[in-house]
């Protein structure tokens, strides 16, 4: 038990994988490191070792897997760095609509209402809204890449604050897409 | 367990076992590669059938297969379908399979075979014992360690039940490996080094699809999906249904209630089904109690019957690709596993879906056992350039307010995987916290599979909300959940009582192990002595080796003398016929060398840490 706490307290995910703490990552390199570390720490390599060593390997490799799973995904990676830097990244289930999305959300809700009311013609605006949101998501991701680069060049707190806002917006748009899909799916 | 496990010297054999719905098979790994272990009757496949004779003797495999015809009421097959399940969730299954469920199975499911009442893990244990015997006869040495395969889509309870079966059979289960992944290991041995491979595994009773990324000896599972109650059995049942109706009108009597008749028909149906994979038409041929039934079956009719079964496999395949973030074009190769993939229609459906011609060069009945042997080779250290990184098939969550699931570990996470969650008390002075863990993808607890209830006990009484218990959920490399809890204020481990929702408790398994030993035909006493001697060998060798370690010289003279004395005492009783005596001296030696072991362990752990540049 002490060992796990020790390992976990001194090693962030980046250190665990032996890579530089950057927001923009070379995914191929990350995978390579992950495979190397797995060869070292996977429980398979400790099957004939003592109980204590087996337990240690189990702890290490589970941390390693968690680290890889987090870092290989840009959004999870950003959330991880934000939380390490003291930002609150708990599930943002805020009902507040980001102001710049007000108009879209209003129109979307109208269309959703109509479709639920049995108006099949509402499907078309919904499809249009969906591709609109998809496009917005792409823009967000592009913006996210820029913020990643900015923070990597100079780790400023303002960049992270901006990043957190962007992640919230991203989550919000994703939820909207999900909502539209839920309505469109049974009809499709 | 002996304190010394740092070096075993000679390696104990580890066998690989494919514990199938219809047939089981053992394999082992030697320097030239994985090999199938033949049975003493010359047949490789051991039918997963268990029968209790009138004498009370339990038999498994081919003998039981014959008894299935003559004594169907005391014989059971396809018991894998019952592993890790409760009475309530096998109601559908019971309509289609003649499982002899015993009275009073509400708490723990048991099957009534003759005058014996056996749980599904116990029944499976008899199949495992048969495989163990085959392996011992073939390898000429005792076998106590195994790698056993399970369907990738097996949940925690089903995995635990399989592990229990191994334990009951006297096998230490070093690892549970997912069947499709095992198949990939067997194939990947001399095949391509890089690329994306899909493994489609349609067996007797289960369906799995796994998508893997191969990279320089690493087999990384990207996603898996499946249906643990879909397979060749279902096709058999459809055919039997048709034949039963025919017979009713032809013979003007029903065969339905006649267990022996149905089993004979079942065998006739399977023979015809298997033939149809190679010829365009086959006949279901039954002769029973002086009457004859014949029915020609052509492939087009057969395919009409099979189509719904094949269709049910395609949905999970698509979901799996989606989870892996891949399209069909990105799949480089497809591997077929399981007897049911011999059906031409299955092959063409898979080829069409993945747009790739499936591999069939290895025998689909044997490839999983061969893969299990490869994994055994990895664990025993014989293979060190290959590594399997598997995933958990189902999301793991805990029940929160209003019966909603809060997901902690998502499906397709590489295992081992962990999540930590803090819990507190709701009432002043509350002494325990109950955590309900479920598995599944749905939002509500009632739509998921209850896995277990964990009771965090002996919490120090204090005002509500002040306690802070940190609970760690860890899915190990077998896909089985381990839970540990710690009081964050004191840093002490909190005791956790596990109440499995479907499986057996540890004590129940313990009892079953004893029971199975009591009924084993071989000389138990001799075997126990042999086992004790093997353990003695290990510890004696370890102590001998430890004497070359610095730690030995750091001991006091008295400590060294005590260790030497304990070694001599163990040597004196080594050839005794009383295994308890040997064990007693092993324990004494263990005790006498505890300090030595601890010092060595610390050095070893220290070295390991240093080696990783932490």
Image: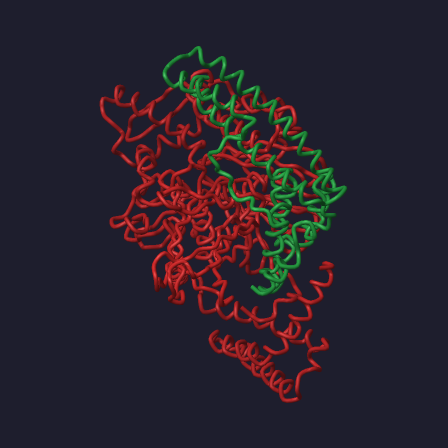
Q: Is residue B438 left or right of residue B96?
A: right
Q: Residue at x 33, y 25 (%)?
A: B241
Most extreme residue toward the left is: B252
Q: How far across and how far down the image is residue B22, in percent?
A: 45, 39
Most extreme residue toward the bottom is: B558
Q: Nearer the viewer, residue A167 or A41?
A: A167
Q: Is residue B92 above or below residue B525?
A: above
Chain depicted in green? A
- Name the quarter where the N terminus of chain A is drawn: bottom right
Query: In terms of image quadrants, where is residue A158?
Result: top right
Most extreme residue toward the top is: A121
Q: Nearer the viewer, residue B438 or B549?
A: B438
Q: How far across and how far down the image is residue B51, in percent?
A: 36, 47
Q: Is residue B245 above or below residue B444?
A: above
Q: Is residue B145 visible?
A: yes
Q: Is residue B528 above or below residue B191?
A: below
Q: How far across and how far down the image is residue A97, in percent?
A: 50, 30
Most extreme residue toward the right is: A153
Q: Is residue B2 above or below residue B392?
A: below
Q: Residue at x 66, y 87 (%)?
A: B556
Q: Nearer the viewer, residue A47 or A187?
A: A187
Q: Is residue A86 left or right of residue A175?
A: right
Q: How far across and how far down the image is residue B462, in percent?
A: 38, 65
Q: Residue at x 48, y 42 (%)?
A: B395
Chain depicted in red? B
Q: Is residue B586 left or right of residue B58?
A: right
Q: Nearer the viewer, residue B357 or B37?
A: B357
């Amino acid at each position: 038990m002490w060992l796990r706490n020790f390992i976990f307290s001194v090693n962030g995910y980046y250190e665990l994988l032996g890579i530089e703490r950057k927001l923009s990552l070379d995914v191929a390199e990350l995978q390579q490191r992950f495979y190397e570390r797995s060869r070292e720490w996977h429980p398979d390599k400790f099957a004939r070792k003592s109980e204590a060593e087996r337990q240690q390997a189990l702890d290490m490799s589970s941390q390693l897997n968690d680290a890889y799973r987090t870092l290989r995904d840009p959004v999870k990676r950003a959330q991880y760095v934000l939380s390490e830097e003291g930002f609150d990244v708990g599930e943002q289930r805020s009902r507040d609509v980001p102001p710049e999305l007000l108009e879209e959300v209003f129109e979307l809700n109208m269309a959703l209402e109509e479709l639920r009311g049995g108006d099949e013609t509402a499907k078309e605006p919904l499809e249009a809204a969906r591709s609109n949101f998809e496009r917005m998501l792409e823009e967000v991701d592009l913006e996210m890449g820029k913020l990643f680069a900015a923070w990597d060049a100079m780790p400023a707190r303002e960049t992270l604050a901006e990043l957190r806002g962007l992640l919230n917006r991203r989550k919000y748009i994703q939820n909207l897409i999900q909502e539209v899909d839920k309505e469109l799916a049974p009809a499709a | 367990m002996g304190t010394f496990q740092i070096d075993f010297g000679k390696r104990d054999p580890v066998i690989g076992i494919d514990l199938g719905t219809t047939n089981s098979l053992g394999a082992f790994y030697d320097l030239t590669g994985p090999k199938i272990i033949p049975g003493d009757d010359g047949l490789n496949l051991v039918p997963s059938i268990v029968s209790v004779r009138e004498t009370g003797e339990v038999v498994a495999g081919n003998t039981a297969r014959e008894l299935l015809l003559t004594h169907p009421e005391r014989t059971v097959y396809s018991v894998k379908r019952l592993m890790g399940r409760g009475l309530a969730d096998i109601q559908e299954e019971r309509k289609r399979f003649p499982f002899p469920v015993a009275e009073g199975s509400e708490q723990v499911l048991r099957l009534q075979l003759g005058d014996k009442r056996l749980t599904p893990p116990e029944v499976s244990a008899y199949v495992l014992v048969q495989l163990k015997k085959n392996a011992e006869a073939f390898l000429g040495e005792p076998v106590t360690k195994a790698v056993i395969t399970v369907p990738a889509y097996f949940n925690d309870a089903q995995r635990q039940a399989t592990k229990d079966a191994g334990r009951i059979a006297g096998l230490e289960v070093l690892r549970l490996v997912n069947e499709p992944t095992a198949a990939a290991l067997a194939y990947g041995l001399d095949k391509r080094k890089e690329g994306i491979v899909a493994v489609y595994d349609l067996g007797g009773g289960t369906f799995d699809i796994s998508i893997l990324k191969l990279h320089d000896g690493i087999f990384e599972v990207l996603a898996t999906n499946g249906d643990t109650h879909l397979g060749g059995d279902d096709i058999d049942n459809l055919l039997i249904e048709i034949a039963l109706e025919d017979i009713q009108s032809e013979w003007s009597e029903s065969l339905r209630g006649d267990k022996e008749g149905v089993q004979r028909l079942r065998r006739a149906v399977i023979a015809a089904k298997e033939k149809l994979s190679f010829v365009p038409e086959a006949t279901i041929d039954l002769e029973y109690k002086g009457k004859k039934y014949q029915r020609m079956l052509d492939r087009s009719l057969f395919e009409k019957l099979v189509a719904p079964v094949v269709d049910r496999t395609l949905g999970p395949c698509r979901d799996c690709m989606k989870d892996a973030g891949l399209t069909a074009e990105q799949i480089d190769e497809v591997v077929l596993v399981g007897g049911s993939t011999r059906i031409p229609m299955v092959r063409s459906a898979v080829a069409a879906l993945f747009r790739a011609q499936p591999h069939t060069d290895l025998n689909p009945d044997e490839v999983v056992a061969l893969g299990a042997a490869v994994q055994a080779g990895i664990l025993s250290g014989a293979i060190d350039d290959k590594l399997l990184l598997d995933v958990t098939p189902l999301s793991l969550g805990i029940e929160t307010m209003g019966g909603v699931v809060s997901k902690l570990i998502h499906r397709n996470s590489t295992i081992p995987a962990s999540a930590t969650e803090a819990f507190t008390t709701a009432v002043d002075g509350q002494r325990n916290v109950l955590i309900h863990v479920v598995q599944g993808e749905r939002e509500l607890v009632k739509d998921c599979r209850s896995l277990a209830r964990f009771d965090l006990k002996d919490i120090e009484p204090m005002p509500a909300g002040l306690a802070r218990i940190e609970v760690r959920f860890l899915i190990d490399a077998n896909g089985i959940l381990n839970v540990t809890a710690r009081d964050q204020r004191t840093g002490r481990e909190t005791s956790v009582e596990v109440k499995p929702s479907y499986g057996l408790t540890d004590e129940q398994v313990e009892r079953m192990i004893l029971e199975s030993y009591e009924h084993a035909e071989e000389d138990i006493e001799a075997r126990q002595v042999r086992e004790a001697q093997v353990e003695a060998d290990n510890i004696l060798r370890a102590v001998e080796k430890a004497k070359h370690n610095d730690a030995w010289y750091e001991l006091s003279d008295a400590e060294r003398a005590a260790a030497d004395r304990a070694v001599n005492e163990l040597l004196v009783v080594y050839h005794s016929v009383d295994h308890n005596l040997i064990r007693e001296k092993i324990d004494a030696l263990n005790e006498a060398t505890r300090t030595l072991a601890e010092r060595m362990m610390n050095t070893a752990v220290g070295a390991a840490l240093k080696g990783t540049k932490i």
